[in-house]
Image (cartoon, rainbow, N blue to C red):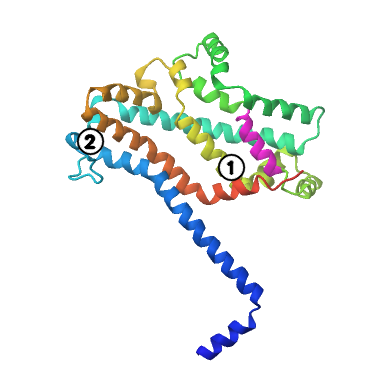
């Protein structure tokens, strides 16, 4: 057996053996470099969750208690007892799901128009859409507030949901347009020869091929809406209508009273983080594929 291995090794050119060794060393050093970075990235999340499971007397101990011993859920109980946290959570779910659906649908339609339809000033208007990325949200909040007050929509969820049905956001439009440009035009032409309209081509032929980039849009938009703070703070006045990102500030205000409320703050933050982690875990395959594919088009 040893002679066979030596015979096979001798048949491999020295240049290829050198390349293989270099690749192995590169992979080894890459892992050595990335493992500490991964630990540093995950550690704050671990510390958040472990602190939420500690008794109030162990939260500010020095030296710190690295593992909660004993484990308690009193911090989670305090979050739900002192605040309408389950109502805030439900509000955030409704707002996030509704606005994400609108953003995905409207951004896909607008991107289809920019990528597939021919009209006067197409490139100019696409540049205008991209230029809106440079306008911060805080600049637009005052005219938006005046507009929503004119329609009587203050202290409702409409200002938080409706704008996402009016284009879906410049960044989402850009991602979807880039992906549309990677799909051959022959698919559209063949469908139109069979009598399909532009809307039918979009809905039945192109949209099913958008799963990877749609996952990217869903993740980005859902995280943005789940963590949105400024708009709900401006447009919502009733405590029972607040999303969880704003409602948690009440828990944070109470955390100044002592380590017991600090544990409640850590518990609330953990509960807010869980949906984001689950969303990325379920969409990770399509998300990574979409990030790669949206950069392949050079047209």
> Could you say where residue 35 lies in the image, as x and y percent from the top left?
44, 53
In the depicted view, which residue is nearer to us: 196 or 205? 205
For residue 216, which quarter of the picture? Answer: top right
- Circle 2/circle 1 CB separation < 8 Å: no
Q: Which residues are magenta?
A: 167-180
| Picture residue at 17% right of the left edge, 34% below the top | 57
In the depicted view, which residue is nearer to us: 242 or 142? 142
**Residue on which disc 1 sits:** 214
**Residue on which disc 2 sits:** 59
**Image side of residue 83 versus residue 202, left or right:** left
Q: Earlier in the sequence, mark 2 or mark 1?
A: 2
| Picture residue at 39% right of the left edge, 22% below the top | 242
* Residue 82 magenta-highlighted: no
In the depicted view, which residue is nearer to us: 92 or 142? 142
Cα gap from disc 2 to disc 1, whole angstroms: 42 Å
Q: How many marks?
A: 2
* Residue 177 magenta-highlighted: yes
> Could you say where residue 181 lies in the image, as x and y percent from the top left?
73, 44
Tell me the quadrant of the picture where the C terminus can be found: top right
Q: Which mark is residue 292?
A: none
* Secondary structure beneath label 1: helix
* Secondary structure beneath label 2: helix
| Picture residue at 74% right of the left edge, 26% below the top | 125
> Could you say where residue 29 lies in the image, as x and y percent from the top left?
50, 59
| Picture residue at 64% right of the left edge, 73% below the top | 16
> Could you say where residue 97 lies in the image, as x and y percent from the top left?
48, 34
For residue 150, which quarter of the picture? Answer: top right
| Labels 2, 1: front one | 2
Badge 2: few (under 14), some or many (20 or more) residues near its Cα, within 10 Å?
Answer: some
Depicted 10 relative to depicted 99: above or below: below
Q: Which SS type dominates the magenta stretch?
A: helix
């Amino acid at each position: 057996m040893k002679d066979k291995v030596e015979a096979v090794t001798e048949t491999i050119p020295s240049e290829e053996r050198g390349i293989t060794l270099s690749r192995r060393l590169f992979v080894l050093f890459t892992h050595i470099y990335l493992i500490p970075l991964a630990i540093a990235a995950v550690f704050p999340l671990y510390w958040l969750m472990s602190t939420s499971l500690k008794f109030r007397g162990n939260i500010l101990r020095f030296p710190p208690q690295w593992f909660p011993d004993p484990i308690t859920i009193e911090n989670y109980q305090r979050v739900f007892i002192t605040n309408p946290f389950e109502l805030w959570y439900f509000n955030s779910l409704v707002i996030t799901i509704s606005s994400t659906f609108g953003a995905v649908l409207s951004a896909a339609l607008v991107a289809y128009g920019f990528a597939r339809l021919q009209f006067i000033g197409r490139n100019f208007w696409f540049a205008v859409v991209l230029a809106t990325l440079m306008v911060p949200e805080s600049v637009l909040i005052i005219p938006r507030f005046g507009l929503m007050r004119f329609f009587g929509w203050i202290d409702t969820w409409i200002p938080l949901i409706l704008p996402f049905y009016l284009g879906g956001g410049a960044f989402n439009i850009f991602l979807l347009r880039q992906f549309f440009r990677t799909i051959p035009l022959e698919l559209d032409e063949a469908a139109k020869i069979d009598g399909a309209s532009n809307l039918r081509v979009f809905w039945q032929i192109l949209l099913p091929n958008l799963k990877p980039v749609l996952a990217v849009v869903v993740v980005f938009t859902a995280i943005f809406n789940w963590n949105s703070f400024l708009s709900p703070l401006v447009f919502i006045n009733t405590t029972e209508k607040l999303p969880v990102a704003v409602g948690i500030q009440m828990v944070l205000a109470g955390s100044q009273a002592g380590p017991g409320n600090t544990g409640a703050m850590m518990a609330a933050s953990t509960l807010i983080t869980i949906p984001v982690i689950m969303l990325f875990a379920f969409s990770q395959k399509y998300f990574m594929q979409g990030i790669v594919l949206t950069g392949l088009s050079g047209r």
